[in-house]
Image (spheres, helix red, strand yellow):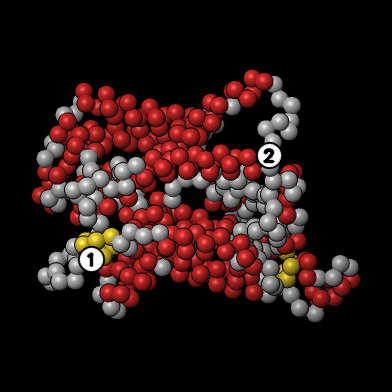
Amino acid sequence: KIYKIFQLNPVLWKYNYSYPLACSCNTSSSNEDTNLSSNNGSYSSLYSCYDCLPTERYVSSSLLQTNYTTISSDETQLPNKALLSLIILLGTCFIAIALKRFRRSNFFGRSSRQTLSDFGMTIALICMVLFDMLITKNAGGHSLTQKITVPSSIRPSDRERGNVWLISPLRKRLPVWVYFASSFPAILISVVLFFEVELTSIMIQSKLKCVNTTKSIKGTGYHLDILIAGVLISVSGLFGLPWICAAPVRSIAHVASLSKYSKTHAPGEKPRLIDIKDQRVTNIGVHILIGCTIFAAPIICKIPVAALFGIFLYFGIVSISGTQLFSRLKMMFIPTKYHPNIGYLRRIRQMKRYAYTFIQIIAAGLLITIKVTNFAFLFPFILVLLVPFRKWCLPCIFTERELTELDGDEQPDSIFDDEIDFYGQVHLPI
């Protein structure tokens, strides 16, 4: 996304602007008044901000679309918008990571460190919003970065629909075969949603087993989740609403917040997980607060889109660091005598470990390549093919014991650690 922004707003060798900037929408429409204001020194540079342009020129229904446009005929007369977006993106990510690592520092008390770490992402977002507001103030009151677009009323985001909420399958006359052919992409989408729900269920199940190891946890409840998700997705499709699936970060954060640890452990020993107070009040409260964000449109409109991409980058960095694949890649460059006492490092031969890691990298590269090309619709199909590949092909290369170590359940100590933040615990089990 940042690369596309730099393509539309290339960095120049020289700029001719000076503060304070003034937007053309703040000046008089007549050339005489404009020249007079310029000669009086009330502003030094003229530019056109995002507020001056029609909304459809730079706003898209999706933040991931190429919706930026150059907003001045002379780019030397205003600061580079791409550099500002990059600073906000990296600033958001770095502040969040710094506060995440603050949890293990020696400053302040344990509770203070944990609070700052848990709210690190929020603090980073607030800091970058304040930074953007400062730039906005120095730029004559108008922003140089694109903000989150929030509609002024509750209505469909597709303007072609107007105020019509229900999408009738018969609103357009289509060939009969189209109705049957659409089932193929529908199956692919259902695979992705199923994997998302199941992956979240597996992570929750593994954490609950740390406390209750002798009985089935939430046995048929997970099947009920799939049923309810299917019904809600069907209803959402009729209204053109987003599809609903499990939220891994929020689910893990909910379980972690309900965890109770021992307070009588020896000095230097990690606290033990004693119990998880399972209840539904906090879940209901969280979703009510999410719904109340529709009344916070004036605040949300001040958040730069680049700050959101900084949050996404933070999610990627902290989640990938907890995967076994990343750990095995890191151990390739560390002498064996410094390896920790972990099963897949001590019980698996080095060449077998490298072979399994190489296969995983190829599979991940294949998925990423398909995802960024025009064949992205085949992503769920390739994802499903990895299941029989793991069940029937890999046993021909590795023994069952080796696969258990390389692709088995995580150890309870590594699953639940009160020194790890919520986002560090949410990662694909690879």
Q: Is residue 314 above or below residue 136?
A: above
At 60% from the left and 71% from the top, the residue drawn is 133
**Is 23 displayed left or right of 230 in the figure?**
right
Give the mark, 2 or 1, whose residue is nearer the N terminus: 2
Q: Which of 81/100 is in front?
A: 100
Name the residue carrying label 2.
167
Q: How many marks?
A: 2
Q: Is residue 350 above or below residue 55?
A: above
Q: Quadrant of residue 293?
A: bottom right
Q: Provide the secondary structure element on which disc 2 rests.
A: loop
**Is 57 displayed left or right of 358 in the figure?**
right
Q: Which of 7/414 is in front?
A: 414
Residue 32: x %, y % from top left: 89, 71
Q: Is residue 257 above or below residue 9?
A: below
Q: Quadrant of residue 304?
A: bottom right
Residue 174: x %, y % from top left: 71, 25
At 23% from the left and 32% from the top, the residue drawn is 355
Q: Provide the secondary structure element on which disc 1 rests.
A: strand
Residue 129 appears in view: yes
Residue 425: x %, y % from top left: 32, 54
- Identity, as a three-letter code, of the amino acid under mark 2: Ile
Q: Which of 206/93 is in front?
A: 206
Other residues around mark 1 within 10 Å, as few (<14) / some (14–19) / many (≥20)? some
